[in-house]
Image (cartoon, grey):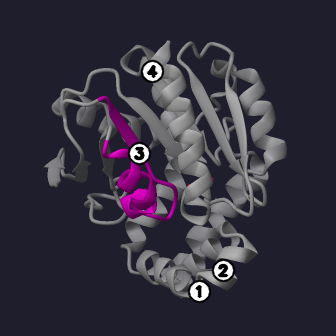
Amino acid sequence: MKEIINGLSVFLEGNSKNKSIIFLHGFPYDHTMWKAQINELSEKYFCVTYDIRGLGESPVDDGQYTMESFVDDLEIIIDQLKLHNPILCGLSMGGYISLRALERMEEKFSAVILCDTRADADGNEGKLKRAAAIKRINTEGLAPFAKDFITNCFGDDYKKNHKDEFEKRIAKSSGFNPVGVKGSLLAMLGRNDTTEYLSKIKIPALVICGEFDALTPPEVMKPLAEKINGAEFVVIKNSGHMSPIENPKEVNKAIMKFLEKIKKK
Ligand code: MLT
């Protein structure tokens, strides 16, 4: 079922009386990246996902976003749906939103799942890369940037064995509004560093990373997991940055195991 909340396209699956999980997608994707997780989890959980402002079916508005405004959107969705202590599950940019949301209002959540993400902010090199990406989109249009960015996100195995789906992802993201995509780049460029908060997280945490993730590799994610008290760290075999799409079986297994464990507590 689709609902419009604060202008955003929000997708709801499962029984709203069940424990809720909110899925936050990465850049430059949309809610459909969580399809395999929601298919399996919606039997027992109320699964909420949405297109982050500027991407997918959500409106672009003025294209001027910050990580704070992305967290504001998340908070409005939680409040409007009256979700009681949902579990947060974010990948990469969705992870940046999740970590900042915890820093701002951890008491609203009961657990967090961080996939292929990082806590540190962009350094100088990263900021210059974002600026170059915006310049490229302005001069060449969105498609060449989207193709290169998405190609770097996926591992070789997926690109070889799921050629059609991979091409469809590129085509879909290439069709997004460039103003919204550039707005996300600026929001990521300007985000704050949440590393200091990691050791303060009190809710249970699962940290997931594709073994061949070229953007947020296991060398980045293992230390992130180690900073969170009691966090579990799972490396997903044969997967790049988009582990929920590339190896849904292993990702779902890790998530289910984590959810069963925290249910017993
Ligand atoms: C993502 O997957 O959301 C992006 O790789 C995040 C980023 O560019 O920092």
SS assignment at label 2: helix
To which quarter of the image does residue 136 belong? bottom right
The residue identified by callout 2 is 159
Q: Pointer 4: residues within 10 angstroms few (<14), some, or many (20+)?
A: few
Tag in front: 3 or 1: 1
- Looking at the image, is mark 4 or mark 2 nearer the viewer? 4
* Horizontal relation, residue 73 to residue 248: left or right: left
The quarter of the rendered structure image containing the N terminus is bottom left
Q: Residue at x 45, y 75 (%)?
A: 173
Q: Hey, what amino acid is under mark 4? A: Lys
The residue depicted at 30 percent of the width and 58 percent of the height is 62
Residue at the spot of label 4: 263
Give the Cα separation between the discs numbered 4 and 1.
Answer: 38 Å
Amino acid type at circle 3 is Phe
Is there CB contact under 8 Å for labels 2 and 1? Answer: yes
- Residue 23 seen in render: yes
**In the image, 15: left or right of 164?**
left
Kind of residue sitting beneath label 2: Lys
Whole-number angstrom distance, CA of label 2 to CA of label 3: 24 Å
Segment colored magenta: 19-43
In this figure, what is the number of numbered marks? 4
Tag 3 residue? 23
Which numbered disc, 3 or 1, marks the residue that appears first in the sequence? 3
Q: For the residue labelled by badge 1, is the local secondary structure a helix, a strand or a loop?
A: helix
Front residue of 55 and 127: 55
Q: Is residue 224 above or below residue 144?
A: above
Q: Amino acid at mark 1?
A: Lys
